[in-house]
Image (spheres, helix red, strand yellow):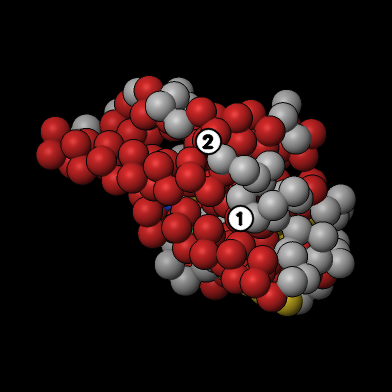
Amino acid sequence: MIKIFGHPASTCTRKVLFTLHETNTPYELVLVDFAKNEHKQEPHLSRQPFGKIPALDDDGFALYESRAMARYLDGKSGGALTPTDLKQRAEMEKWISIETENFSGNAMKFVAHHIFKSEQTPETMEKAAKGLALACSVLEKNLANKTFLVGDKLTIADITYAPYIDYAMATPAKEIFAKYPHFVAWWNRVSERPAWHKALGR
Ligand SMILES: N[C@@H](CCC(=O)N[C@@H](CS)C(=O)NCC(=O)O)C(=O)O
């Protein structure tokens, strides 16, 4: 049985849970208690040397890094979330890189400031707003004629954005998103997925 060591409120854990539910993979979620700082202590540090969640154990195969875990879980279940076409697969990887490099960090500044009450400077917030708007404008152009980021089918790329958008929608970042109608329509399609609702425990 696949074990995920994580927390249901963590964005990186949610990315993995979304993948597990999309691929109908049975799993057990083992809670790593942030409040008790369990992620910074053994045995968790042996699973994730950077002291972060999530980590995975599949009958003795240990893996950390949520995006690597999503790729592993999809591959193991048959690869339905990864295009077989080489060019489409390259596109999927491109959108995952953009999520990592240009989207999530900026979105999470809004979440840190407005939800977790970790005060950010006005300069930081201004930079985050500009970075997020640029990323959204790039996504918007791509989504003008696509159902999902790579085409008609949901891929790991769509999954990686979901936890960050979900949190950021409850902050003023929502006003930035609202300027990009194709982005919002895409988010509505992704967030309507039953697997996403299950990942959130709803
Ligand atoms: N690149 C890592 C990042 C993991 C990460 O940042 N996890 C957050 C929760 S979403 C965490 O453990 N934060 C606690 C900390 O940094 O102390 C991954 O994708 O798994």
The first of marks 2 and 1 along the sequence is: 1
Amino acid on which disc 2 is placed: Phe
Q: Residue 117, how many percent across, how many down?
A: 30, 28
Helix, strand or loop status at disc 2:
helix
Identified at 40% across, 42% down, the residue is: 137
Q: Which residue is mark 2?
A: 183
Residue 63 lies left or right of residue 177; in this view the side is right
Amino acid on which disc 1 is placed: Ala
The residue lying toward the viewer, choosing from 196 and 186, is: 186
Which residue lies most toward the front here?
A: 145
Vertical placement of residue 27 versus 167, above or below: below
Vertical placement of residue 14 versus 86, above or below: above
Q: Which residue is mark 1?
A: 157
Residues at badges 2 and 1 in contact (C-beta under 8 Å)?
no
Q: CA distance from mark 2 to mark 1?
A: 14 Å
The residue lying toward the viewer, choosing from 56 and 79, is: 79
Q: Residue 67, how many percent across, how many down?
A: 58, 62
